[in-house]
Amino acid sequence: MLSRFFGDREFMRNMLKLSGPIALQNLLITSFSLLDTVMVSTIGEASLAAVGFAMAWGAFLNFLIFGITSGASVIIVQYWGTNDIDRIRHTYGISLIFAAIVSFLFGLFSFSFPEIILRMFTPDPLVISAGAPYIRIVSPAYLITAIGMIVSTVLRSTERVKLPLVASIVGVSINVLLNYILIFGNFGAPRLGIQGAAISSLVSTIMNLGVLMGVSLIQKNIAVPPLRILFTFDTVLMKRFVTVCLPVFINEIFWGAGKTIFAIIYGHMGTDSYAALTAYRTVESVMFTLFVGICNATTIMVGKKVGAGKPDEAFREARYSAAWVPVWSVFFSLILILLRYPFMRFFSLGDIAMAIGVSLMLIAAAEQPFRYFNYIFIVGIFRAGGDTKTSLKIDMIGQWCVGIVLAAFGGLVLKLPFLIVYAVAACSESVLKVVLSLHRFVSRKWIMAITEEGKHVQTPS
């Protein structure tokens, strides 16, 4: 009986095989990010807020690159369903070119104007003076990170999920070790504080990419094809790449810009509030990254079926994945509620920031289930089906027409308390997007094959 809702043994076996390593990789990264934040918080709330703003700025690039990788993944998983290796390699090459251009320009701007960037988030001179060197040091890592994201996407989309996990283990381990040495001046090293955290991030990023490419060269896997194949592509594939990826890229530009605007709004509501928000988001991201593994597995499984011309099987597997969302979200919400005080005590926060952080945990517990539904539909299912335009529309309506408007009006115009503004904006945005996503999902109109095999099959409407 339960298999009708949650999937049969084959579905569960495939889901665990794909989502397990991805979830573990994300868990390791966010767990060590949690340790980084804890270590930085001992320097002071100004340093913690500075790192939070720098991370918010860097996250904007991640959203842009995720727009490229997510769109490329749609094409790759569908061609993986037809075993068209050449088209996969060509898509890989196009993705690398776009990601390298975007990340290089982003890094150059970050290196040249870190103070201007930080002034967008906060007027606090202590935070700006602490954060500017951090951004300048990590700016070369933006290009390296982008290339690593493309390589990892190609490997994951072709069901090689273990190598990105191994590379992340090496990278985050080095990051934590160097943080311990350079932030506090251990083992005879100079005490560099927040700049030590920046150096650690840069070195660990280099090592992560080094492991990805080094092992790929040894294995001779799909991540290291001959250059003449990698950067040779036809106009038909380029048109498909632009058609599929452009809505996703625009989606992530506006999503990342929206998140940056949220950070600016909340940053102008007080350093205590943003320090608490930085701490809370670090904890909450540990939960969320486990769910990202399920979402990535869903993309691969659904995309393969769509590409192979099996729309009914694609819809069924998408429905199974969606059915698990309430189970996971309730479990994670209970963890946040029960452990909110122990989690917040990890950070060296003042009384005001501590109280705000604990309250944010309760708000997240209520909002999380809706956000998880949105993520599985918009990122895991609609994009896997090739329906990238709907994802763009739903995100734009929810974030820009509801979330940002409510946050800006409540926080900057009405001057309401931070917690009220955050709760209203986050919950209103998530609930609206769930309603829109469910309507689209049930219609099955999100099943839009890219491959020739998939196009020959009449998609249910």
Image (cartoon, rainbow, N blue to C red):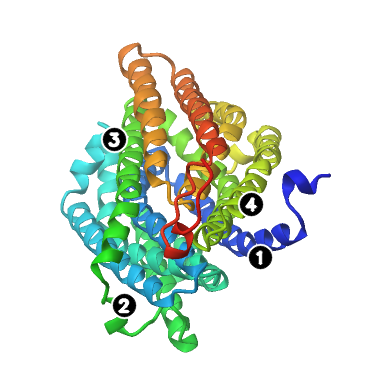
The local crowd at label 3, few if under 14, some if 14 to 19, many if 20 or more residues have their Cα within 10 Å, is many
**In the image, what residue type sits under mark 3?**
Phe
User: Is 35 rendered above or below residue 229?
Assistant: above
Of the image marks 3 and 4, the number of the one nearer the N terminus: 3
Please state which of residues 147 and 233 is positioned toward the viewer in this rendering.
233
Judged from the image, the secondary structure of the residue bearing numbered disc 4 is: helix
**In the image, what residue type sits under mark 1?**
Lys
Q: CA distance from mark 1 to mark 4?
A: 15 Å
The numbered dot on residue 17 is: 1
Please state which of residues 273 and 220 is positioned toward the viewer in this rendering.
220
Of the image marks 1 and 4, the number of the one nearer the N terminus: 1
Give the residue at the far top of this rendering.
414
Of the image marks 2 and 4, the number of the one nearer the N terminus: 2
Q: Which residue is mark 2?
A: 230
Res 254 quadrant in image: top left
**In the image, what residue type sits under mark 2?**
Leu
Of the image marks 2 and 1, the number of the one nearer the N terminus: 1
Can you give x and y, in whole percent of width and height, for residue 171 in the image? Answer: 47, 68
Q: Residue at x 43, y 63 (%)?
A: 451
**In the image, what residue type sits under mark 4?**
Glu
Res 345 quadrant in image: top right
Q: CA distance from mark 2 to mark 4?
A: 32 Å
